[in-house]
Image: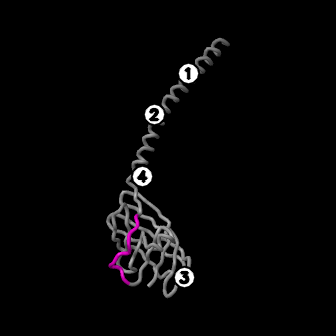
Amino acid sequence: MRSIVVALSSCLLLFSACTQKESTHLETPQAKKEKDTTAQTIEKDSTALKFSAFAYPQDIEGCSCYFSSSREEFVKQNYLYVDDYQRKAYVKLKDQLHILSFKHLNPEATTMLHIEAQNKQVNVVLQAELVEKGEIETALYQGTLTATDRKGNTTTQEVYGECGC
């Protein structure tokens, strides 16, 4: 009886050793799959959205919001987002200027700004908090600008800018 238990234990030990080797062998294709997924992610990132700066559009007059990537870029007038409070907003993504229609707009906000605009290719959300009340109907804001294309690619950029008349 004792020899049967020892033989059975030996078989179990041998079986578990083979199983461990086999599972280690199976991990290699899993590692390969993870590597392939990483490669796809990098490849997807190469097509990801990216904001580009542009000059203030000539057809915008009067009240508007305009935002840059930083205070320094704002002073240089390199804008990532510009709108006219009424009909349209502009963003430049992957070096293509997009004209957007408003989905949601609250430019009269006192401390928080929330603007949503879209076209057939992209949705853009601007969320910003009041930094400083400016002179004569203007206010400086700091926040984020997020764009999402129809494929689900998203980019978010910190922004600094002004709204006013």
Which residue lies at the image location 37% right of the left edge and 66% below the top edge?
Answer: 92
Q: Secondary structure at mark 2?
A: helix
Amino acid carrying label 1: it is: Phe
Under mark 4, the amino acid is Asp
Q: In this figure, what is the number of numbered marks?
A: 4
What residue lies at 65% left-to-right and 11% top-to-bottom? 3
The amino acid type of the residue labelled 2 equals: Pro
Residue bearing the label numbered 3: 133
Q: Is residue 26 left or right of residue 122?
A: right
Q: Are marks 3 and 4 in contact (CB under 8 Å)?
A: no
Q: Residues under labels 3 and 1: Cα distance? A: 75 Å
- Numbered disc 3: secondary structure: strand
Q: Main secondary structure of the magenta part?
A: loop
State the mark number for residue 15: 1
Between label 1 and label 2, give the one nearer the viewer.
2
The residue to which callout 2 is attached is: 29
- Is 132 one of the magenta-colored residues? no
Tell me how far mark 3 sits from mark 4, CA to CA: 38 Å
**First in sequence: mark 1 or mark 4?**
1
**Label disc, if present, on residue 45 of the rendered structure:** 4
Q: CA distance from mark 2 to mark 4?
A: 24 Å
Q: Amino acid at mark 3?
A: Lys
Front residue of this view, candidates 27 and 44: 44
Q: What is the span of residues highlighted in magenta in the rendered image?
A: 52-61
